[in-house]
Image: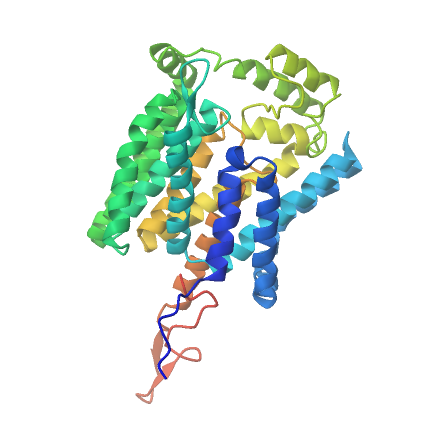
Amino acid sequence: MLAGPRLSINLATLLTFGAFAALVLNAMLGPLAALTFLACAGLLMISNVPLSVDSVRRYWFVLLLPVYCIFTALWSLYPSNSIRYGVQLGFTLVFAIVMTGRLSTTTLMRLMFAVYGIGVLASIGLGRTGTGGAWLGVFGSKNAFAAHIAVFMLIAVAIAADRHSPALLRLSGVAGTIVSGPLLVLAQSTGAILMVAPCLAIILLTLLITRLTGMQKLLLVALVSIALAAIALGVFVAGDALMAEILEGSGKDATLTGRTDLWATGLSYIAERPLQGLGYRSFWVIGFAPAEELWAMFDVPSGAGFNFHNTYISNAVEIGLVGLGLQVALIYGGAALMAAYAFARPNAPNALLLSLQALMILRSFIEVEVFFEFSIRSIMGVATLLYAIQGLLALRHQRPVPVRHHPGGLLSHVGLSSRPRPYPHPHL
C-alpha cells in the first residue's frame, strides 16, 4: 500500500521562526514576547542536545561577554540586576550559537523575510501616526519603526536578487523593496535613510563580484578601500560640520534631539570608572539619582528604558572599556570575517549578513542595539560572526592538498587525502 503525500516540517526552522517572531514583533506581543522566545529557544536547544553542546563547545568564546557581565556584579551598584540580566544575555547568545549550527544562511534569510514582512503588513494595516506626524506602524516609536523598515528593505533586496530563490519569493522581495521606500520616508528618520543607502550598496557590490574576474575583483576591492578611507578621513576632519549641514538641511535638531548632552554625561561617568564601569545594567535603574535626573530632563517616564543613544558610550558606562572591548571584537570581527567570506563566496545570504552588520555598526553611533537580553540585533551580530567562521573554515578544508614530486618519479600526497574534508555544517 502506497503512502500518501506527507508534509515535512523542519523543527529547527519552526522554532527559530517562533523565537524571531517574538522578538521582532515585541511591540505587538507585549509580555508574551519574552515568554515565547524563551520557550522556542529552549526547545531548539534541547531538540538536539549533542549538537547544541558541540556548538557551544566550539564557540565558547562568544560567552565570555555574558560571563563578564555577570562578573561585574562584584562591583555593581545593583548586583542583582547584573546577575539577572547577564544570565538572560547568556541564554540569548547560546540561542544564537545553537541556531547557526542548525540553520543555513539561506533558510535564515527567508525566515527573516517572513518575520519582518509580518511587521510591515501589520504596520500598513494597523499602524498609527505619532504626535509629530511620523508614521509609527505597530511600534512604540518612529525610530523603532524606521529600524524595522530599514532591515526589511535590506532583506527584501537580498531575496529579490537571490538567483536560487523561487520566482514567487523573488517577486515578493521586489514588492517588499518597493513598499519599503515610502514607509521609510513616512517614518521621518533621516538617520535610517542615510544609513540604509550604503548597506544597499554593499549587497549590490557583493553580488556584482560574481560577474567579475580575479583581477577585476582586486580592482573593485582597491577602489572601495580608497573610497572608504576618503570617507573616513572626511568624517574625521569635518564630521561635525557635515553632520550639522545635513541636519539643518533636513530640519533636524543640531544636537540630535539632545543626544550630544547625553553623550557628554555618559563620558563623564566613563572617566570616573573607565575600566570596570558601574556594573552591567546598573545605570538606568528606578531610584538611581543620575538616571532619574536624565529621565526628568528629557521628559521620559521613570524606568522607560532610556539610554545614551550611543552603543560605545552607553555600554562603557556599565561594563567599562574591558567589556566594551569584548563587544567591539564581536561586532567588528563579525564584519571583517563576513566581508572576507562574502568576497570568497558572494551570494545573497552572505551579502545580507554583511549589510546587516554594517547597518549595526552605522547605527551604533546614535543608538544602542547590542548587547542585551532578548535582542534580535544581538543574535544576528553573533550569528554573522559564527557563520563567517564556519564558512571560512569550510573553504579552508576544501582546498586541494598540494602534491610533491619525489626523486623516484612517484607522486606522494602531502596529508591524508587530496579530497575536500567533511565539515560539520554541510549546509554552508
Picture residue at 59% right of the left edge, 26% below the top? 313
The answer to whether residue 275 is above or below residue 16 is above
Quick one: which residue is furthest to the front in this view?
Answer: 1
Quadrant (top left/top right/bottom left/bottom right) for the N terminus: bottom left
Image coordinates of residue 127 in percent, x first then y, are 42, 27
The answer to whether residue 109 is above or below residue 421 is above
Q: Nearer the viewer, residue 89 or 321?
A: 89
412 displayed left or right of 103: left
Q: Nearer the viewer, residue 138 or 310?
A: 138
The answer to whether residue 206 is above or below residue 179 is below
Quarter occupied by residue 344: bottom left
Quarter occupied by residue 197: top left
31 displayed left or right of 404: right
Image coordinates of residue 83 in percent, x first then y, are 74, 41
Picture residue at 35% right of the left edge, 13% below the top? 250
208 displayed left or right of 83: left
Q: Does residue 240 appear in this view?
A: yes
Q: Does residue 221 appear in this view?
A: no
Looking at the picture, the colour scheme in use is rainbow
Image coordinates of residue 297 in percent, x first then y, are 62, 10
